[in-house]
Image (cartoon, rainbow, N blue to C red):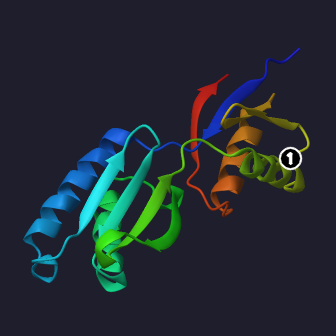
Amino acid sequence: MAKNSTFDITSDIDLQEVDNAINQARKEVGQRYDFKGSAAEIDFDKDAPSLTLTADDDYRLKSLIDVVQTRLIKRNVPIRNLDYGEIEPASGGKVRQVIRLQQGIPVEKGKEIIRSIKDGGFKKVQAQIQDEQVRVQSASIDDLQDVIKYLREKDFGIELQFGNFRS
């Protein structure tokens, strides 16, 4: 009997790279002319993980988000895994927005990925959710490569990473 080959689909963010990007963004905000004299702040909570952006008004908040996104992109952090909260008023007439960093694949997205694999017509491929990742297995390595190619063309709203390939 043929041995099954497997790979895992994950969606992780390197928190050290996020920290580096936030430090660069803070430095840029301190040097930019349009932020002079304003109270723009970026707080990074590694435990949650989340970012809290605070600015004087909506315009500066949007500029602050743009700076943060630019730095995250340059550090190869997938910004598709950012979950933007509502803009809420803060003390002193300021505005605040909390951005949650999505670690792992949520169960709903995992079910959507599995349904997509089944709808793709891959007969000899099994997929299952394990914690915050999806494990895909098949007897044929070619089928697994076709699944990876198929999933890269789909949009699930999060950045997918394929790894832990075993044959």
The answer to whether residue 119 is above or below residue 148 is below
Quarter holding residue 60: bottom left
The answer to whether residue 115 is above or below residue 165 is below
Q: Which quadrant holds the C terminus?
A: top right
Task: Give 117 or 36, whichever is nearer the viewer.
Answer: 36
| Horizontal and vertical percent position of residue 24 | 19, 56
| Horizontal and vertical percent position of residue 3 | 79, 17
Q: Residue at x 45, y 61 (%)?
A: 98
Q: Residue at x 29, y 73 (%)?
A: 92
The answer to whether residue 60 is above or below residue 11 is below
Quarter holding residue 145: top right
Task: Give 145 or 27, whichever is nearer the viewer.
Answer: 27
| Horizontal and vertical percent position of residue 160 | 59, 49
Q: Residue at x 91, y 43 (%)?
A: 123
Asked if residue 32 lies left or right of residue 161, the reply is: left
Asked if residue 138 lies left or right of residue 166, the reply is: right
Label 1 CA crowd tier, 10 Å (few <14, some 14–19, many 20+): some
Residue type beneath disc 1: Phe
Task: Give 61 or 70, whichever is nearer the viewer.
Answer: 61
What number of labels is visible? Answer: 1
Residue pointed to by mark 1: 122
SS class, disc 1: loop
**Do we see residue 30 in this rendering?**
yes
Question: Which residue is the extreme one toward the top?
Answer: 1
Asked if residue 28 lies left or right of residue 47, the reply is: left
**Do we see residue 75 in this rendering?**
no
Q: Which quadrant holds the N terminus?
A: top right
| Horizontal and vertical percent position of residue 48 | 47, 42
Q: Residue at x 36, y 53 (%)?
A: 76
